Image (cartoon, rainbow, N blue to C red):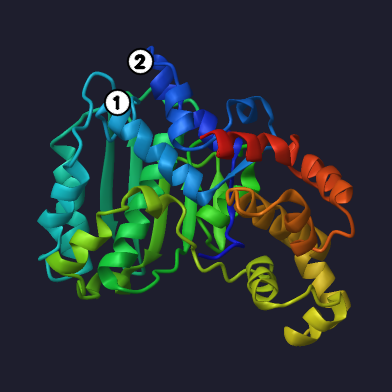
Amino acid sequence: MDARKHSIPINFVVAALRGVHAAGIDARAILERASIAPELLDAPSARVSTEQYTALVQAIWFTLSDEFMGFCPARPCKLGTFAMMCYTVIHCGTLERALKRGTRFYGLLTDAFSVEFERHEQCATLVFTNHQLDDPDHFLTESWLVIWHGLACWLAGRRIQLIEATFSYAEPPHVDEYRRMFYAPTMRFGAARTTLSFPASALDLPIVQNEVTLRQFLKTSPADLLVRPKNDDSLTGQIRAILRKAYDYPEFEQIAQRLNMTPQTLRRRLKDEGSSYQQIKDNLRRDTAIYFLSRPELGLDEIAAQLGFSEPSAFHRAFKKWTGVTPGVYRQERISG
């Protein structure tokens, strides 16, 4: 397992639990199943591992018996619905037919929201419209966009690069996470519609999956579609990929040389992406730390050393700066869980 995966901001955990709270259910058991310390919900900078987040989503589905996670209480979605939709589209032949059939499938289940598919000359567009959902954080909206895009990529057996992502609401404070979730050259908030667009040529791609591969896919999907890497081609993503493979963090000048740029050009382009080399290194160390803390066989001193800290106290200070809580909060919940 890659110890340097991305982590998930705690506000996505808080948003995911809104349907649980609306149903009058105590979320503590769900958090325990996902090994997420309740204290993290009150720490705005806290994050969880991708494994914890996937487990959380699955725990909510099973607790509520609802794949809509409580956001559509008038018409919950029975467990197994997503799987049945996948079996319905797996033999469609092309991605276009699969998307059309899949979106029609869900159109028969609820009037609370709709996912529609459009084909234009140069691009294809998935349109999500909220008709009656009580979803102030747009959690279900964004989750379904990510799931449909991930499903399309899986069905075609290749990454389908997005052209544009638009959202019919204001830019959130955690907009940097959207760049990872919906990596696209153009991203607009306050738009007329919430959409994902990709090249129309992708619609002619053949479905390369079958019922055998689908059974394996459904063991963890669609939950893990929410956290699968999007093959970020941004400079930030490229540098992060380089650092994942490096034994130690190279100097900035070495990174610039690797990317065939001058240090000045690389620094300017990272600034345009709202990032910096130091921020990329800190985020990678933070995410690696969160992963290591999920492994009780590793002591805090050993984790600090593996992350390159000269002493454990420096690791404690850095981790609290990154997440707002101490490593012990993560470790205590993991061990007790």
Residue 97: image tag: none
Q: Taking 248 as reference, is 273 above or below it?
A: above
Q: Helix, strand, or loop for circle 1?
A: helix
Q: Residue at x 32, y 50 (%)?
A: 222
Q: Is disc 2 surrounded by few (<14), some (14 to 19) or many (20+) residues within 10 Å?
A: some
Name the secondary structure under disc 2. loop
Asked whether residue 163 appears in the rendered view, the answer is yes
**Residue located 78% across and 79% down the image:** 255
- Describe residue 11's horizontal placement relative to residue 108 as left or right: right
Per the image, the residue denoted by label 2 is 23
Q: Nearer the viewer, residue 216 or 141?
A: 216
Amino acid, disc 2: Ala
Q: Of marks 2 and 1, which one's residue comes earlier in the chain? A: 2
Residue at the disc numbered 1? 64
Taking the image as shown, residue 224 lies to the left or right of residue 65, namely right
Q: In terms of depth relative to the viewer, which is nearer, 278 or 46? A: 46
Residue 101 point in image, percent of width and height: 14, 54
Looking at the picture, tell me which residue is in the foreground, 168 or 144. 144
> Residue, x 40% and y 38% (percent of image)?
57
Relative to 219, say whether 68 is above or below.
above
Q: Position of residue 25 (x, y in %)?
A: 39, 16
Q: Position of residue 118 (x, y in %)?
A: 27, 55
Q: How far from the left and from the top, in percent, is residue 7? A: 59, 50
Under mark 1, the amino acid is Leu
Left or right of 277 in this view: 74: left
Question: In this picture, is 44 found above or below 178?
Answer: above
3D distance between C-alphas at marks 2 and 1: 8 Å
Which residue is depicted at the point 55% across and 59% down?
186
Asked whether the beta carbons under mark 2 and mark 1 sit within 8 Å of each other, the answer is: yes
Q: Nearer the viewer, residue 271 or 321?
A: 321
325 in relation to 133, above or below: below
Q: Quadrant of residue 93?
A: bottom left
